[in-house]
Structures are given as C-alpha cells and as structure tokens.
Image (spheres, rainbow, N blue to C red):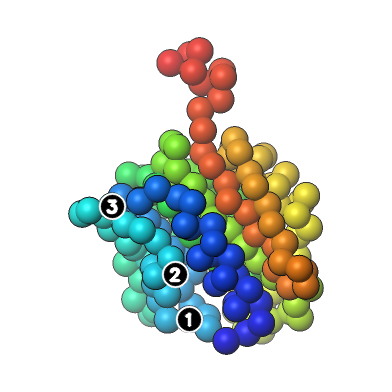
C-alpha cells in the first residue's frame, strides 16, 4: 500500500464516522492498489442499503460503467446516491471540471461526496492510458467543488501534504428554496 493510500484510508475512516448511515453509496474508480469496493469497510449502510462500484473500464467488472467526463450517460440518470466516493481518481482525468460536475449530479440532495487526490506525491498512472495530470491545493479543490454546485465543502490535508481531500455536501441554495 502506498504512503498516500495509507493516509487516505485513515482519513476515510475518520470522515465516514461522522456520516449517517447511507441508503445508496457509489464508489468511483475501482482500478488501483485496493480491490474494487475496498472503501466499503468505512461506510455504514442503512438497512437494505446498496453499495455499488463504478469505473470507465468495463473489464474491471464494476457495477456501473461510468465515464465522469461525459455530459450524459445512463448512470447520470439513475437515482442519485447518498454518498459518492471518488478516491485517487480526479488526478487521472483531463476534463477535471466536467468530472466534478458529474460528481455533483451523482450526489443526492442532502448527500455527500468524498474526494481525494495526491498532493506532494510523484506522478503515477499508466502512460498512454491514464496518466497523472493534476495536483490541487486545498483552496483549488474547494473552489472546484463549489463551482460544481456543492454548498458546503470541508477540505483537509494530511500533515505531510501527501494528499488533499474534501467532503462536499449537496444542499439546496436559497434561490432553489424560493423557487420550489
């Protein structure tokens, strides 16, 4: 397990303890160091809740095949999820803003999205297929999530600055409340 993954798994355990049990959970990006669905151990599912995995690579056998950069996909039309986990994925996506907007669309009203990515960690990934493009500061990640529509964003950085992450909540804005 990489040092970054170790830091992120500890933070995932800490953050998810504060969340209520989720009815629908989606873990995005299941390729990598951990087996698919490895973050499930940190999530408290409500009785009868579901935990699904998603990846753009159908060969990995995710529950849902999803490319976060597409403006339309069948997955984006399903019932949104109470918790969306996107760990160590965004640094591999060239169209970063489109991907974060898709995360917002996948998150249910009142739900949360957990995202993280490396910061002071060497570039990684498969040359030619999924290279490593991005490192965001805490302020950059927060702004990106706010611009996508998340109302409340709490960012974190581990003490060694190996990783940066956030828990973003999807809330109604005052304008949406008034027009409802």
Q: Residue at x 70, y 47 (%)?
A: 142
Residue ID at (78%, 72%): 160
Pick the quarter of the image with the C terminus: top left
In the rendered image, which residue does mark 1 sit on? 34
On the rendered structure, is 155 left or right of 34?
right
CB within 8 Å, label 2 to label 1: yes
- Rendered position, 127 above or below 116: below
Q: Which residue position is annotated with label 2? A: 39
**Residue at position x 66%, y 40% from top?**
146
Q: Is residue 177 visible?
A: yes
The mark that comes first in sequence, 2 or 3, is 2
Kindly report which numbered mark, 3 or 1, lies closer to the viewer in this rendering: 3
| Element class at badge 3 | strand
Q: Tell me the distance, in whole angstroms, between the alpha carbons under discs 2 and 1.
A: 9 Å
Q: Is residue 72 visible?
A: no
Image x and y of residue 154, in percent: 65, 47
Q: Position of residue 173 (x, y in %)?
A: 56, 25
Residue corresponding to mark 3:
46
Cα–Cα gap, marks 3 and 1:
24 Å
**In the image, which disc is placed on residue 180?**
none
Cα distance in 3D space between marks 2 and 3? 16 Å
Q: Secondary structure at mark 1?
A: loop
């Amino acid at each position: 397990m990489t040092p970054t993954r170790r830091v992120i798994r500890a933070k995932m355990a800490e953050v998810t303890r504060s969340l209520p049990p989720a009815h629908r959970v989606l873990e995005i990006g299941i390729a990598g160091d951990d087996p698919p669905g490895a973050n499930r151990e940190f999530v408290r599912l409500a009785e009868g809740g579901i935990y699904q995995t998603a990846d753009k690579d159908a060969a990995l056998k995710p529950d849902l095949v999803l490319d976060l950069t597409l403006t339309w996909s069948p997955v984006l039309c399903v019932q949104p999820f109470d918790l969306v986990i996107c760990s160590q994925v965004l640094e591999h996506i060239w169209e970063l803003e489109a991907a974060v907007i898709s995360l917002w669309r996948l998150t249910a009203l009142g739900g949360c999205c957990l995202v993280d990515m490396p910061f002071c960690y060497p570039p990684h990934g498969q040359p030619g297929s999924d290279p490593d493009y991005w490192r965001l500061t805490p302020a950059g990640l927060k702004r990106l999530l706010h611009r996508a529509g998340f109302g409340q964003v709490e960012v974190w950085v581990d003490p060694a600055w190996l990783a940066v992450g956030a828990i973003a909540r999807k809330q109604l804005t005052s304008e949406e409340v008034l027009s409802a």
